């Protein structure tokens, strides 16, 4: 433990990182001691053996259907149970539903509820930092599978799981988890296929082991693919992203940017056309009395998140455009070159002096009309006296400003004197005075 002054650190995560020295880097001399070998067997060796077994095991139609059904059942027990119920407490479940989810989730073979939730809560609390066990900034492979069998350089951040320790069903699952895995991941799929249509071996290989391999990787896509593929409609400061393809692979967990912004919402997809079967399962459970208190974030605040990112995109587009120059010289009629006949094509509109050189022969109304106002105030003519000019004309005119007529600028609340493109300008907080900001 290293003693560090909290006031000298940038933020809380930085402060925590300075408390302990990281593990030494992995080298050719110590790599063998930096691997969780038992996990390596589960994630690498077991799948290889499984695919070899599948090569010598015919796949019958009934077994294929059973494999897909049991994959969905096991997957939903993780997404609706481990994730949205226990990790985020996004709804309340009856003891019957909790027990079913605790048992069925063992068929996915992803560790106990307590182990899974501890890591996931750390992921949300310390997203994209070295305290995040699945830190996506360390690369796709690390967040997908590397964190499972390679010892991290730092322990993941501390989180509160006291609610799980008070849950007797969660503790029961932890105590009997190895037996539940044997029963739900191997025995049950084999029994159904064997008793149902005599395919004991196929049930074990496909609905048992193959299903476990697939579901382990599709669940891992929430840590990897969901932080790599898609867009960020709510917050682009984090790596979490949204994409239909990820949602399709993960039973609805692909709208990950929304989930990281509003983690206690029982939904991942908020639009009717977005794919989120986990949301509909929870909703159906609430209709039959198995679930209650489904949490949703206020729609008004969700729309604020969307607006924030939309404004950010608009600001970026705004910064790419060229705007009228600031800090123009203040002049009067006597010193203004407008008074020198037709030599300089300068005129005044809305209190600004404009240089029309190069535009005279391009004016849609003809050059002769402009010549009448050289050296004069053409505000009335421009603002409807002769023609009610378009937004484009206002914007183009503003780009030709070269000076401000002393005492000639109208009040800023008169919108007709402000180019339409600047009426709703997106501003950074640094551009506002303290009084305006607060």
Image (cartoon, grey):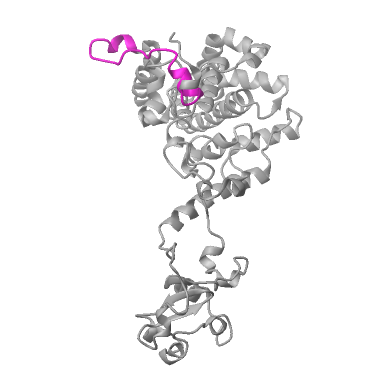
24 magenta-colored:
yes
Is residue 407 placed above or below 40 in the rendered structure? below
Q: Residue at x 49, y 55 (%)?
A: 314
Name of the residue lying farthest toward the left: 28
The answer, for residue 100, to whether it is visible in the render is yes
Q: How far from the left and from the top, in percent, is residue 117?
A: 56, 20
Residue 180, picture quadrant: top right
Name of the residue lying farthest toward the right: 289
Q: Residue at x 48, y 27 (%)?
A: 215
Is residue 371 placed above or below 300 in the rendered structure? below
Relative depth, front residue between 248 and 241: 241
Q: Residue at x 55, y 50 (%)?
A: 432
Relative depth, front residue between 201 and 184: 184
Q: How far from the left and from the top, in percent, is residue 37?
A: 36, 11
Q: How far from the left and from the top, in percent, is residue 24?
A: 32, 13
196 magenta-colored:
no
- Quarter of the picture holding the C terminus: top right
Relative depth, front residue between 292 and 157: 157
Q: How far from the left and from the top, in percent, is residue 240?
A: 48, 36
- Quarter of the picture holding the N terminus: top left
How many marks the image carries: the answer is: 0
Relative depth, front residue between 261 and 96: 261
Decide if residue 146 is on the left or right side of residue 215.
left
Is residue 37 placed above or below 138 in the rendered structure? above
Magenta segment range?
Answer: 9-34
Residue 409, picture quadrant: bottom right
The answer, for residue 193, to whether it is visible in the render is no
Q: Main secondary structure of the magenta part?
A: loop
Q: Residue at x 66, y 13 (%)?
A: 169
């Amino acid at each position: 433990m290293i003693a560090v002054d909290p006031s000298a650190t940038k933020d809380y995560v930085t402060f925590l990182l300075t408390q302990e020295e990281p593990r030494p880097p992995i080298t050719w001399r110590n790599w063998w001691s930096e691997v969780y070998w038992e996990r390596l067997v589960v994630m690498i060796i077991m799948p290889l053996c499984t695919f070899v077994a599948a090569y010598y095991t015919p796949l019958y139609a009934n077994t294929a259907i059973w494999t897909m059904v049991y994959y969905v059942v096991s997957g939903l027990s993780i997404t609706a149970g481990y994730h949205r119920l226990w990790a985020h407490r996004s709804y309340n479940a009856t003891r019957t539903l909790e027990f079913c989810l605790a048992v069925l989730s063992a068929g996915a073979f992803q560790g106990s509820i307590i182990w899974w939730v501890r890591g996931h809560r750390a992921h949300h609390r310390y997203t994209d930092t070295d305290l995040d066990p699945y830190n996506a900034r360390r690369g796709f492979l690390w967040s997908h599978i590397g964190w499972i069998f390679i010892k991290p350089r730092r322990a993941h951040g501390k989180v509160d799981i006291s609610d799980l320790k008070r849950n007797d069903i969660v503790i029961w699952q932890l105590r009997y988890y190895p037996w539940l895995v044997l029963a739900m991941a191997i025995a049950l799929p084999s029994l159904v296929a064997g008793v149902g249509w005599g395919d004991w071996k196929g049930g074990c290989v496909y609905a048992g082991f193959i299903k476990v391999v697939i579901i382990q990787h599709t669940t891992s896509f929430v840590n990897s693919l969901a932080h790599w593929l898609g867009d960020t409609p709510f917050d682009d400061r984090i790596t979490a992203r949204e994409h239909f393809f990820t949602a399709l692979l993960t039973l609805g967990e692909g709208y990950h940017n929304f989930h990281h912004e509003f983690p206690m919402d029982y939904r991942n997809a908020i639009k009717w056309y977005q794919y989120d079967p986990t949301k509909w399962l929870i909703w159906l459970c609430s209709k039959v009395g198995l679930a209650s208190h489904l949490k949703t974030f206020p729609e008004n605040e969700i729309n604020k998140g969307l607006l924030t990112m939309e404004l950010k995109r608009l600001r970026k587009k705004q910064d790419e455009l060229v705007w009228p120059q600031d800090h123009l010289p203040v002049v009067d009629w006597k010193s203004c070159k407008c008074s020198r006949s037709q030599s300089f094509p300068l005129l005044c509109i809305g209190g600004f002096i404009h240089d029309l050189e190069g535009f005279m022969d391009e004016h849609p109304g003809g050059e002769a009309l402009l010549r009448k106002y050289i050296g004069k105030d053409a505000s009335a003519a421009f603002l409807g006296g002769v023609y009610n000019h378009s937004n484009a004309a206002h914007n183009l005119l503003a780009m030709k400003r070269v000076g401000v007529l002393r005492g000639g600028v109208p009040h800023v609340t008169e919108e007709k004197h402000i180019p339409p493109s600047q009426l709703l300008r997106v501003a950074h907080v640094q551009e506002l005075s303290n009084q305006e900001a607060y």
